[in-house]
Image (cartoon, grey):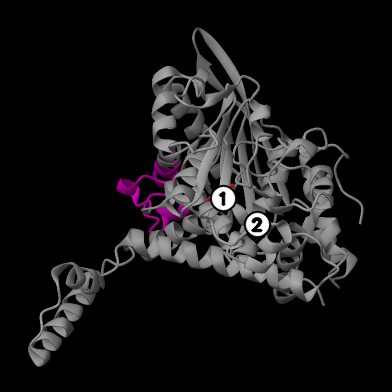
Amino acid sequence: MASTANETSFFSDVCKNFDSAAKFTSHPEGLLAQIKACNSVYRFQFPIRRGNGFEVIDAWRVEHSHHMSPTKGGIRYSDMVNEDEVMALAALMTYKCAIVNVPFGGAKGGICINPKNYTVAELETITRRYTTELIKKNFIGPGIDVPAPDYGSGEREMSWIADTYMTMNPGSLDALGCVTGKPIALHGIRGRKEATGRGVAYAVRECVNHADDMKKLGLTAGLADKKIIVQGLGNVGYHTAKFITEFGGTIVGICEFEGAIYNANGLNVDEVFAHRKNTGSLLGFPGAKDFKNSKEGLEQACDILIPAALENQITAENIRNIKAKIIAEGANGPCTPEAEEIFTGMGGIIIPDMYCNAGGVTVSYFEWLKNLSHVAFGRMENRYAENSNANLINTLESLTGKTIPTEHRLMIVKGASELELVNSGLEDTMIHSYREIRQTLIDKPEVKTLRTAAFVNSIDKIAVSYMNLGVWP
Ligand code: GLU
C-alpha cells in the first residue's frame, strides 16, 4: 500500500512503518487503508491581543481513528508544530493505545507557539480560546476526544482546559473527564506526571530481562551492568533516568539542546538536574566530559540509548556512529525508518515509541476512569483492607503466641494507595504488552523488528474493532 503523505514527512514515516507491518497481516486492503487514514483533521486560527495589537495563532486537532471513542492524545505547544507532525503523532496515538490495550482512538493537538515567549496570562488566553474552538466543533469531551499534556504543556494548561470545558458545560457530571494530566486538586491522578518516564524504565527493564534476547546482542540479562545515555532532561527524560537508576542501571550520558555530558562511571541525575537549573546548562557538571555538539553525546559508549526529546534525532546520517545495542524510544519518532533498517543490520534492536512511551496514556486512562467513577482508586477499600489485615495478624499472634516485628506488620497490614495502584497497573501493562510484542516476533519469524511486531499486533486489534463496528461485512 502506498503512503498517503509526501515521502519525507513524519506522517509518511509512520505510514511506512505501518505498511511494513501490514503485509504480515491478512486484512483487506481497504480496511488497512481506513486504519491508516487520519479520520478528522481540524486546522484553525484565532486571534489574541498582544501588546498594542493582535496576533494570529495557528492550531490543530487531529483525530486519527474513530474506531474507539473517545479519541486521546496530548496537545503540543511548540513553534515547530505543523499539520504533518500532528497527523503523525495522532496516528502513533492510535497504534499506541491499541498496543497497551487502552480503549481509545488516537488524536493529537498542536498550537504553533514557543510558550517561553508568552506571559502566563497570554498562555491562559490561548489555551482557553483553543478549548473553546474545540468545543464549537465538538472536538472535545469525555466521550469524544480527551486531550492531555505533550511537549510544551503540563498540568497548568490542562486545568485551564478543564475549567473552560466545565464552564461551557454546566451540570455535566463527567465534565472533568474531558482532559487528563490535570493537577490532583482538579481530580488528576497520582503518578500521571512521571508515568511516561516510569513506563519507559519498565519497558527497558523488561527488554533486558529476556536473557536469550540479550545473549544475541552480546549482553547479559538485567539492568545491573548496563550503561545508559538519555537524550532530553524534560519530564520524560528526567523520570526515565531516575527510575532506570532506581532499577539498577547506570546513566553515563545526558544530552540536551545546549550540549551533552558523559561520565563512564555514572551520573547522579538529580545532581545534574540541579546543576542545569542553577547554571542554565548541562555543561560543566563536575567529573563529566562536555560535548558542545549535543548529537556527539548520543555517539558515546553505552549499552542503551534512550532518545526522550523530539522526533527525527537518529537518522541514516548518525546511526552508524551509535555505540548502543538497544535504542529505547522515549520520544515519539526519534528514529527514522532508514536509521532503523541500518541499525537492525548492525545487529541492534529498537524498543519502539508506540510501546515504549505508552505509560503516559496508560495512566491517563486510569485518570479518565477515576473522573468517570467520581472516586479515587483505593478510597473505599484502603482502610478496610488495613483493618482486616490487622485482624488477621492479631489472630495469628494470639494463636501462636509470637509477635510479628513492627516493620513486617506495617508492610503486611497496609492497604494500597492510589499511587501504588496506578504504578502497579502501569507496570503490569508495560510487562504484558512487551511480552505480547515479543511473542509475535517468535510466532512470525518473517517479522524482524519489535516495531513491526508492535504494528502487527496493533493493526490486528484495530481491525477487530472495525469488524465489530459493523462497518465491514
Ligand atoms: N502526550 C502523551 C503521548 O504522546 C500522552 C497522551 C495522553 O495521555 O493522552 O503519549
- Are dots 2 and 1 in contact, CB under 8 Å? yes
x 88%, y 49%: residue: 3
Distance between the alpha carbons at the discs numbered 2 and 1: 9 Å
Q: Nearer the viewer, residue 405 or 443?
A: 405
For mark 2, what is the residue? 219
- Report x, y in % for residue 30: 87, 64
- Residue 57, percent across and down? 61, 25
Residue at image location 84% in from the left, 63% down from the top: 22
Furthest residue in direction right, as rendered: 2
- Judge whether 79 appears above or below 70 on screen: above
* Camera sees residue 192: yes
Q: Residue furthest bottom?
A: 399
Say left or right for 50 vs 406: right
Relative to residue 473, is residue 42 drawn left or right? Answer: left
Give me the residue at 75% from left, 69% from top. 441
* The stretch drawn in magenta includes residue 253: no
Count of numbered marks: 2
- Report which residue position mark 1 lands on: 226
- Give the magenta part as a residue range: 160-188
For disc 1, the neighbor class at 10 Å (few under 14, some 14 to 19, many from 20) is: some
Quarter of the rendering occupied by the N terminus: bottom right
Mark 1: amino acid: Lys
Q: Is residue 181 at all visible to an observer of this figure?
A: no
The CB of the residue at mark 2 lies under 8 Å from ligand 1: no
